């Protein structure tokens, strides 16, 4: 099954609750929340309090994308705040297996995100523990960037790796997903599509989400 996960990074934060409810009504499957620390990525965004507030307005799966150094230090706080899925960046943790176990211990979904230049074989010995892999198709930090074309090959290679190992691991794509790019991304083997600006900068969320879903 394919899923759409609007990224609230491009939403109007002055009415975040309404924005989340609007995309839920418009057909969103997950809500993607981008946590940035100003160190791992050159931008600062939200913390556990906003996850907690988001959890009050929706029952959809809260997909928390941690773009922070020392993720181990904060994982429990995000779980307590209501995260249903947490992804950490491969590039931010020395003991990836331990970090993944910290997430899984609390019975929520664990994912690892890879920057555009990070190879997929870094995940070979942890893949079986992952519920999902986030392939970044832009350099993390900002919404509204262009999709990096060689990501298509990377998704295909990851799909092959997952299939060979006969695993249920989902492939999530994050960055530059829009009506023009979604079809190729989907055909390459993607399961979860994060889309920020394509949805929140559009004038009709329902129309946009329906169109995106019609093309995958
Ligand atoms: C970027 C974030 C994305 C971002 C995607 O670092 O991880 O989730 O919101 O934005 P769009 O869909 O506009 O590329
Ligand atoms: Zn993200």
Image (tube, rainbow, N blue to C red):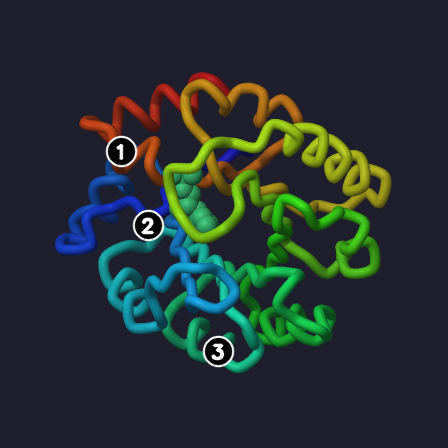
Please rate how many residues cluster around mark 2, counting C-alpha atoms within 10 Å: few if below 14, some from 14 to 19, many from 20: many
Relative side of 129 to 18, left or right = right
Please rate how many residues cluster around mark 3, counting C-alpha atoms within 10 Å: few if below 14, some from 14 to 19, many from 20: some
Please rate how many residues cluster around mark 1, counting C-alpha atoms within 10 Å: few if below 14, some from 14 to 19, many from 20: some
In the picture, residue 27 is in which quadrant?
top left
**Disc 3 and disc 1: Cα gap in Å?**
32 Å
Between discs 3 and 1, the one toward the N terminus: 1
Q: Is residue 195 visible?
A: no
Q: Which residue is mark 2?
A: 9
Q: Is residue 166 above or below residue 148?
A: below
For the N terminus, give its image quadrant.
top right
Q: Which residue is mark 3?
A: 74
Q: Which residue is mark 1?
A: 26
In the picture, residue 126 is in which quadrant?
bottom right
**Disc 3 and disc 2: Cα gap in Å?**
20 Å
Q: Is residue 77 above or below residue 30?
A: below
The label on residue 143 is none
Which image quadrant shows ligand 1? top left
Q: Nearer the viewer, mark 2 or mark 1?
A: 2
Q: Position of residue 56 (x, y in %)?
A: 24, 63
2 and 1 marks in contact (CB < 8 Å): no
Secondary structure found at label 3 = loop
Whether ligand 1 has any atom under 8 Å from the Cβ at mark 2 is answered as: yes
Residue at image x 63%, y 44%?
A: 116
Nearest the camera: 204 or 11?
A: 11
Relative side of 107 to 46, left or right = right
Secondary structure found at label 1 = loop
């Amino acid at each position: 099954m394919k899923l759409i996960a609007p990224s609230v990074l491009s939403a109007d934060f002055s009415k975040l609750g309404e924005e989340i409810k609007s995309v839920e009504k418009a057909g969103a499957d997950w809500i993607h929340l981008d946590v940035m620390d100003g160190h791992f990525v050159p931008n600062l965004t939200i913390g556990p309090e906003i996850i907690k507030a988001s959890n009050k307005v929706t029952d959809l799966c809260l997909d928390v994308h941690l773009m922070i150094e020392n993720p181990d230090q904060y994982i429990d706080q995000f779980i307590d705040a209501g995260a249903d899925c947490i992804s950490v960046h491969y590039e931010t943790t020395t003991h990836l297996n331990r970090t993944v176990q910290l997430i899984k211990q609390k019975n929520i979904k664990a994912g690892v995100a890879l920057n555009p230049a990070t190879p997929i074989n870094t995940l070979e010995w942890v893949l079986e523990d992952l519920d999902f892999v986030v392939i970044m198709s832009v350099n993390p930090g900002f919404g509204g960037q262009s999709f990096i074309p060689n990501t298509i090959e990377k998704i295909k290679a990851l799909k092959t790796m997952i299939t060979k190992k006969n695993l249920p691991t989902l492939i999530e794509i994050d960055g530059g997903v829009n009506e023009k790019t979604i079809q190729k991304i989907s055909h390459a083997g993607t399961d979860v599509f994060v889309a920020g600006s394509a949805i929140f900068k559009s004038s009709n969320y329902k129309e946009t989400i329906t169109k995106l879903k019609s093309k995958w």
